Image (cartoon, helix red, strand yellow):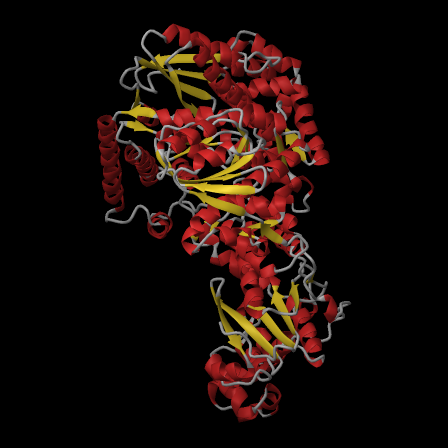
Amino acid sequence: MPKSEATPARPCLLLLDGHSLAYRAFYALKDANLMTSDGQHTEAVYGFTSMLTNILRDEQPTNVAVCFDRSEPTFRHVEYTEYKANRSETPEDFRGQMQLIYELLDTMRIPHLSLPGYEADDLIATLATRAAAEGMNVLIVTGDRDALQLVSSEITVLMTRRGISDMTRFTPEAVVEKYDLTPQQYPDFAALRGDPSDNLLSIPGVGEKTAAKWVREFGSLTALVDRVDEVKGKVGDKLREHVAQVLMNRRLTELMRDVPLDVDLTDLQQGAWDREEINKLFDTLQIRGELRERVFKVLGTGEAEPEQGFEVETVILGPDRVTGWLSALPEGRAGLAFKGAYGSGTGRIDGIAIASPDGTAAHIDPTRLTEADETALRAWLGDPARPKAVHDAKGPMLALWAQGMELRGLTCDTALAAYLAMPGQRTFALEDLARRYLNRDLKVEEESGGQAALFGDDDDAPAKDLALRAHAVRELAQSLETFLAGRGGTQLLEEVELPLLTVLAQMERAGIAADRQYLAGLEAEFGAAVKQAVEEAHRVVGEPFNLGSPKQLQEIFFVRLNLPKTKKTKTGYTTDADALTWLATQTDHELPIIMLRHRDQQKLRTTVEGLIKEITDDGRIHTTFNQIVAATGRLSSEKPNLQNIPIRTAEGRRIRQGFVVGEGYETLLTADYSQIELRIMAHLSGDEALIAAFESGHDFHQATAARVFDLPPEQVDGELRARIKAMNYGLAYGLSDFGLSGQLNIPVAEARALKEEYFEEFGGVRDFLHEIVTQARKDGYTETIMGRRRYLPDLTSDNRQRREMAERMALNAPIQGSAADIIKVAMLNVHQALREEGLRSRMLLQVHDELVFEVAPGELEMLRQVVTDQMNSAYSLRVPLEVSVGIGRTWEDAGH
């Protein structure tokens, strides 16, 4: 897209049709299904931001405004009530994003305009006409071809074509080349052609070629109407029949150039923006990485633009120099940065940078050390009395272990500290944190001169970069600790998250043994089931088809088989799992059930295939545990994701049979908390009836159902218990009436009545849930029993969808977050107790509320006692914690 050839000194006004671009972005990215972890769609926001950023970068306007349509009728609707009446209803997923786009523009300090009674095109036409008269160049970005009537020597139109980056630049010459008409003639042509998108009717039998020919031949629509009898043939008859329609089209197509806008062109300039505001919005929308950096680069000098890099004075320590440098290191905390390859079971360190408290730094190549240097480095790294700060320390910790070194004395992990300060962020990269908390780019301050004098050539660039990162970590640690102290997170960092790093690293290093042969057989079995489902599907349809093709499935289900229609999407009627389940209840046809079985078996096969790939040479699977992913504080795992292993079906549980006790150990032991979220809800709400249900000695869900339905516990059948179980767990996760109706397959009104019955018995729970949201709206955050905060700015959002999502998160975060806190404390306590008792048994996995241990010979009863005691005493609740323990050769056998 070539840039305008306007005189550089001449000001340029950029005008964007906001709704047009947002719609374009939404549909271009709809198949990408972009959404936040909380379910907020962001396709339109992401695409709009990308388009806007690219245009600002390429065109570099001096003035800018984004114009939007409004919901009120315009003067065009007054003249023609059917104007745009054929347009389909705005998709809900799109409607919920418009407020986000307004918020984005406000945050970027870019003016946006709308006016009741007028369309965005009219505002654009007015501003463009005014700007051109005042000697400005104008660039209009839109997807509406009506804007071509504005093109002149001063006004250029950028017309979107496909996707979010393909545009055509229309100058007067380009309009003539494309349509063989001048911009002034274009609205006459459009009136004759009609516009289905605006419900402006065309002349039957008259297409674009004929309409353009008439305008060229007669010069204008006015002349054509004056001489309409000269048009011969059937098309002439049709034209004469529809002259009134054409003239109305022409009036409606004409853009207004004198809209009463109370704005001065000098006001249409980007204001001073704040990096932190943009970061917060992008964190909320989970817009990360490249687009965020592109936005900052394009915006240029905002209020919070980083003013400098880091002053770095660094030396490279060759052989025989490490010992002396470390011995002279002053007291105080050092910053460390590592370069290497990290893995759960292994790793290596290729470079270490140490930033001294006095502002100097050293780079060490651990592969080029003398014996004395290696001894000194090992001693310093492993000295708990020498405080250290590291960014994302678990990977380097594992790699150092693989090289026979320890990392002790860690007083701050800047990734963990940033996570506790702002758990809603979706990036904790050191570069982003340095900008956010230090207002500095991760680069060397060129005027310092220190580094240039100490490095001889560019071959040392990697060492320079690593030293720079160590400096940033040291300064960032202090800033984050101050910030975190103001948010009450210091104790969580120092007493829970930092100590847990070592525990998790040891679990990752240990891994869990896997039975490769068993898993291979299971994969083959699931593969055979997939193949059988494919053959059955082909048989019932009568011909082969691709079971993974939504388009083919839509054709088969809704055209050939004429099954009931499911939810309509952009690409047709959905065939997702929910739709197939619904179809299975609405018809006797075999295909929906076969398709569900095919997808289940395919998912199981893929899961097992992924596990087999992760088995290392030691015959074990070493997952990676993440502390900074879930905003609630829960741990997650990846490579492989052990939380993804299905356990609700018998076939899914068979996968757990592939995890076995390793050589040198006698069995696996699993321990998990029983109904921990419900116990926490009883504790936090103080509801006496709920507490009494736990203390009754009956099954908890049976006991609560008995209270709700006023029955003796023994008369509560399976259906009633299932209803209250869904309620018990659902309330802890902000379950709505609609969500409950879906879970129980009952009408929404019945679900609402069930909740009301529940709250009549458990009024303390109702009051507690109400108070959580009220207090969170007042404070801006929720808090767990250990002070873990989750900030929810959308609780006061004008966007209903975002506000309701934030309310559900406010209900969920204190309960699920408290459960996460408790099991983390339990892990720390169990780990410490194992060391104190001198046991060789070890903790291998944490999945949700469950811990998995490998039991050394002769230690079973001692381990059982240690685990039970430490998990039960992790936190004192009004309803005591309860731990269930199981033992077996495999993970599944040890289940309970």
Q: Quadrant of residue 685?
A: top right
* Figure check: 229 above or below 541: below
Please state if 68 lies on the left or on the right of 505 as rendered: right
Check the image and report above or below for 338 versus 404.
below
> Closest to the observer: 216 or 853?
853
Seen from the viewer's position, the closer of residues 797 and 194 is 797
- Residue at horizontal 62 percent and vertical 43 percent from the top: 437
In front of the other: 835 or 743:
835
Q: Residue at x 58, y 74 (%)?
A: 146
Taking depth in this image into account, of 589 and 579 the one nearest to the observer is 579
Query: Left or right of 587: which side holds 715?
Result: right
299 relative to 427, above or below: below
Q: Position of residue 284 (x, y in %)?
A: 59, 44
| Left or right of 186 in this view: 644 | left
Tally the numbered discs: 0
- Residue 613 appears in the picture as rendered: yes
**Residue 839 rendering spot, x and y as whole percentages:** 39, 11
Tell me if I can see residue 306 in this picture.
Answer: no
Residue 186 is situated, as x and y percent measured from the top left of the image, at 56, 81
Which residue is pictured at 23% across the width and 37% down the height?
Answer: 532
Instruction: Identify the image quadrant of the C terminus.
Output: top left
